[in-house]
Image (cartoon, rainbow, N blue to C red):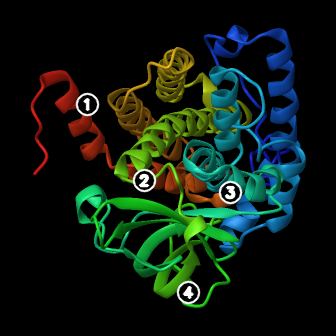
Amino acid sequence: MTCAPTEASPELGPAPALEDADYFHVSNMLSPEEQQRLKVMRDVLTQEIRPHAAEFWTKDEFPHHLLKKLGQHGFGAIETEPGSRLFKGLVYAELARADLSLSTLVGIHNELIVGALLEAGSAEQQDRWIQRLKTFDAVGSFALTEPDHGSDIAKGLCTTATKEGDEWVLNGFKRWIGGATFADFLIVFARDTADHEVKGFIVETDRPGVHARKIEHKMALRIIPNADITLENVRIPAENALTGAANFSAANILLRNSRAWVGWEAAGAQMAIYDVVHHYATSRHQFGRPLAEFQLVQQPIAKILGNVTASLAMMAQLARLQEAAGLEMSHAALVKASTTALARESAQLGRGLLGGNGILADREMGKIFADVEAIYTYEGTYEVNSLIVGRAVTGFSAFA
C-alpha cells in the first residue's frame, strides 16, 4: 500500500478533456463548414485560453495578451462575420466553457458594443470603430447600470445629458461597467434633460471628467475588471450621439439580444462543469475503486448532463427564432432565467462531487461555481426575467 499520490489522481493528472457534453449533438445541425469553423475556434480556446484562465482569475488580473489572441482568431467579429445564429451561439458557449470572465467580455463586446454600433450608430461611427473592434485593437464598455438603479433602470436612470450648442454635456454615475478601466470608449445611456428620453452616446474615456475606478473584492468573474464610472461635466460633440438610440427602446433591443447570449453562456458553463466532473470521477479512486463506479457519483453526473442538454436544446430553438426574426423579449428572458438556474444547480452538484477539491480555482470547479453566481444575476435577475415572462403569458404586469 502506498500513501503517495498516484498518476491517476486529479492533482497530478492532465487537465479535463472536452467530454461529449453536447449529448444530443446540437452542433450537428450546423453545416459542415460551420462545424469545422467551430472545431477550429474550440481548439484555440481549449489549447490557448482555458489552461491559463485560473491563474489570472486567482490573481484578479486581466490578461491583455489573451484578449489579443482572441482577436486574432475572430472572436471580436462574431456579430460582423457571416454565420448562422446557431453557430454564433455555440461559439459563445465554447467561450464560456473555456472561461466565464473572458466570455463575458467577449459577449458584451459583440452583443452590446458592436451590436449598439450596428443597430444605432451612424455610418461615421461605424467607420471609426467597427474595424478596430473586430480585432480588439479597440475596446468599448457598455455603461447602463447605475449605483442605485439596476432592475428599474428604464424608469430610474439618473445620468443626464444636456445639449449645449453643438455639444452634449453628461453628468452622473455608472456601476458594474465591465472592462471600463482599459476601454477606449463607453457607450453611455443618459437622460436628455430636454425631453427626458434615455439616449445613447459614445464617450471616449480620455475626455476630461471621465473617471473609472475598479471595483475590488469580487468573488466572481475576477478576470474581467468592473468599474464605477463618474461623469463630471463631460463634453462630447453632437455627432457622438447614437443616432438610432433616441429613446430607451434601443437599449431594450440590445438587452433582449444580450439575455439570449447569456443563455448560451450558461450552457457553456455547464459544458465545462461536465468536463470537470467526468474527468474527476473517472480518474480519482476511493475505497480502491474509481469514483465513477459509485451510484451517488453517477447520479449527479447524469443530472448535470441532463441540465446542459436541456439548456442546449432550448438555445437551439431560440437560435431558430432569431433566424426567423421572431425573437421577443419574453423568449430571451425565459432562456436567461432558466439556463442560468440550471447552471447554478449544476455548479452546486459539481462542487459537491469534487469534495474539498471543488473549492479550488485551479481545479476549475471552484472558479466556475463562483462565476455562475454572477451570470445568474446579471442581464436581469432571475426574478425580474421571470416577471417579464409572466407578463407576456398572462397579460398582467406584476412590476411595481
CA distance for labels 3 and 2: 28 Å
Cα–Cα span, label 4 and label 2: 23 Å
Residue under pointer 4: 211
Amino acid at dot 3: Gln
Residue 125 is tagged as 3
Instruction: Check disc 1 and give the amino acid type.
Output: Val
Q: Residues within 10 Å of mark 3 (few under 14, many from 20)?
A: some
Q: Which residue is mark 1?
A: 389
The amino acid at mark 2 is Tyr
Name the disc covering residue 378, or none. 2
Mark nearest the camera among 4 and 1 is 4
- Whichever of callouts 4 and 2 sits on the residue coming sooner in the sequence is 4
Kind of residue sitting beneath label 4: His
Q: Residues within 10 Å of mark 2 (few under 14, many from 20)?
A: some
Q: Nearer the viewer, mark 2 or mark 1?
A: 1
Secondary element under disc 2, as helix, strand or loop, is loop
